[in-house]
Image (cartoon, rainbow, N blue to C red):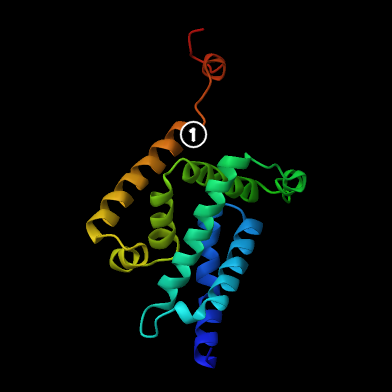
């Protein structure tokens, strides 16, 4: 392994971490996924073809590891981390709470997407890859990327609209001038 390749892998880490966070929806799991991706890439560096995109190769490794985890989770069932409940509370402040609620709503909406849609949202919307670059990473035609992204965005919007709080009848009835 050359110093240049090592340097390129290190430079890719922030982008790889954003991709992993988008896939897992959890910082700790994302960090674990990035670490496992790097270990897999380093142990199989001879499989990388010089002259090809290192980021595509690393994204593919991360995606395959994540899909393997998801399949294993279906077999074993959901595991609950007790310490995760403590991390849900944050510092006081309206802005912080609203931001967290928005992020939670988006994460929950992302969980309803198909794996293919979630991967493309992560690559294009979070990591900023072009449609062409995303198509190369996941090895599908650019038209498929565009249609899956359109459906993913529509599904995200619909899920976020469905989960938006609606005024209750009780609060509407207590307003002056309303007939109860």
Name the residue rendered at 36%, 85% in the picture.
51
- Whether 137 is drawn above or below 178: the answer is below
Residue furthest left as drawn:
143
Circle 1 is placed at which residue position?
164
- Hey, which residue is sitting farthest top in the picture? 180
SS class, disc 1: loop
How many dots with numbers?
Answer: 1
Residue lying at 56% horizontally and 19% vertically, measured from the top left: 171
With respect to residue 80, does 116 lie above or below?
below
Residue situated in front as seen by the camera: 16 or 159: 16
Q: Position of residue 122 (x, y in %)?
A: 44, 58
* Spot occupied by residue 56 in the image (x, y as percentages of width and height): 41, 71
Q: Residue 151 versus residue 71: which sits nearer the camera?
A: 71
Q: Position of residue 71 (x, y in %)?
A: 53, 47
| Residue found 31% across the figure and 50% down from its top | 148
Which picture quadrant has residue 57?
Answer: bottom left
Residue placed most toward the observer, 162 or 178: 162
Q: Is residue 30 above or below residue 78?
A: below
Crowding near pointer 1: few (<14 within 10 Å), some, many (20+)? few
User: Residue at 56% of width from left, 52% of height from top?
Assistant: 69
85 vs 4, nearest the viewer = 4
Residue 140 horizontal/vertical position (percent): 29, 60
In this view, 148 is above or below 14: above
């Amino acid at each position: 392994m050359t110093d240049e390749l090592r340097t390129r892998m290190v430079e890719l880490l922030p982008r790889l971490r954003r991709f992993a966070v988008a896939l897992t929806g959890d910082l700790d799991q994302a960090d674990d996924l990035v670490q496992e991706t790097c270990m897999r890439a380093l142990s199989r560096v001879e499989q990388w073809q010089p002259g090809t995109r290192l980021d595509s190769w690393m994204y593919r490794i991360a995606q395959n590891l994540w899909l393997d985890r998801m399949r294993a989770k279906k077999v074993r069932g959901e595991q609950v981390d007790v310490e995760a409940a403590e991390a849900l509370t944050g510092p006081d402040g309206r802005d912080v709470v609203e931001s967290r609620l928005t992020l939670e709503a988006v994460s929950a909406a992302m969980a309803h997407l198909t794996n293919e849609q979630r991967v493309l949202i992560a690559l294009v919307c979070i990591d900023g890859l072009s449609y062409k670059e995303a198509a190369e990473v996941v090895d599908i035609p650019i038209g498929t990327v565009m249609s899956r992204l359109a459906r993913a965005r529509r599904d995200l919007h619909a899920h976020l609209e469905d989960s938006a709080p609606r005024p209750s009848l009780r609060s509407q009835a207590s307003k002056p001038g309303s007939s109860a």
